[in-house]
Amino acid sequence: MRIRTSTIEELPHLQDIERAAGRCFRDIGMDEIADDEPLTLAELGRYQRAGRAWVAVDDTDRAMAYVITDPVDGNTHIEQISVHPDSARRGVGRALIEHVAARAAADGVPALTLTTFVDVAWNAPYYAARCGFRTLTEDELTPGLWQIRHSEAGHGLDRWPRVCMRRDTF
């Protein structure tokens, strides 16, 4: 497995990865999440052009997973990370997180942040146990994280418990 920046040409494939990864939510009764459409090609293109979209690729250089990030209050926020189910449980997502963490640390960025579902095994429990994230209290939320959570609530994501998490990079 290799990690590289995404290309414009593969953005439709990133949408396919997100759709496939989302289907897993149907198995746990979160059909609305499973049916949610991925980011548009224009939105993904903005991440790609900004150099904030990376893919994990197989031996044929085909993307198996991707991650996109945003700068939020001086930290690197993982906006989306998706692993195709055919490549799940192989450390691909964790490798993408480690890649983002190494880049953040090299750039002097103090932490990674993300928002996620509390009760989904491959979300908050995974990030805490396997990736070194910790759940932030409401008092620890920065203005940018509050804004993200407000936006998520507006999209109906608060139907299920969600949290903000943080991992220091140094």
Image (tube, helix red, strand yellow):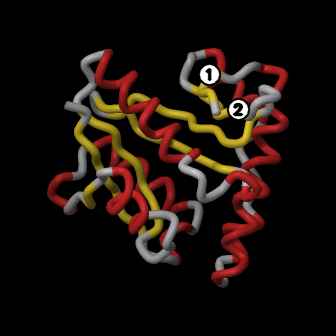
Snapshot quadrant of residue 61 = top right
- Circle 2 residue: 57
Q: Give the percent coordinates (x, y) of residue 81.
A: 57, 46
Residue 10: x %, y % from top left: 81, 28
Checking the image for residue 123, the label placed there is none
Side of 25 where 110 appears, left or right: left
Quarter in which the N terminus is drawn: top right
Image position of 29 with respect to 69: above or below:
below
The amino acid sitting under disc 1 is Arg
Residue 54: name its quadrant: top right
Position of 95 with respect to 47 (left or right) is left
Crowding near the residue tagged with mark 1, few <14, some 14–19, many ≥20 C-alpha atoms within 10 Å: some
Nearer to us in this view, 142 or 53 = 53
C-alpha gap between disc 2 and disc 1: 8 Å
Residue at image point 76% right, 39% down: 14
Residue 100, given in percent of the width and then of the height, sits at 44, 31
The structure residue drawn at horizontal position 64% and vertical position 38%, both measured from the top left corner, is 66
Q: Are marks 2 and 1 in contact (CB under 8 Å)?
A: yes
Task: Residue 159: give x, y in percent of width and height.
Answer: 52, 77
Q: Where 84 sits versus 33, above or below?
A: above
| 10 Å crowding of disc 2: few (<14), some (14-19), many (20+) | some
The C terminus - image quarter: top left
* Left or right of 15, for residue 99: left
Residue drawn 43% across the image and 63% down it: 126
Residue farthest along the left direction in this orientation: 139
The residue type indicated by label 2 comes to: Val
| N-terminal-most mark, 2 or 1 | 1
Q: Secondary structure at mark 2?
A: strand
Q: Single out the residue that lies furthest toward the bottom.
A: 29
Q: Is residue 111 left or right of residue 125?
A: left
Q: Which mark is residue 4?
A: 1
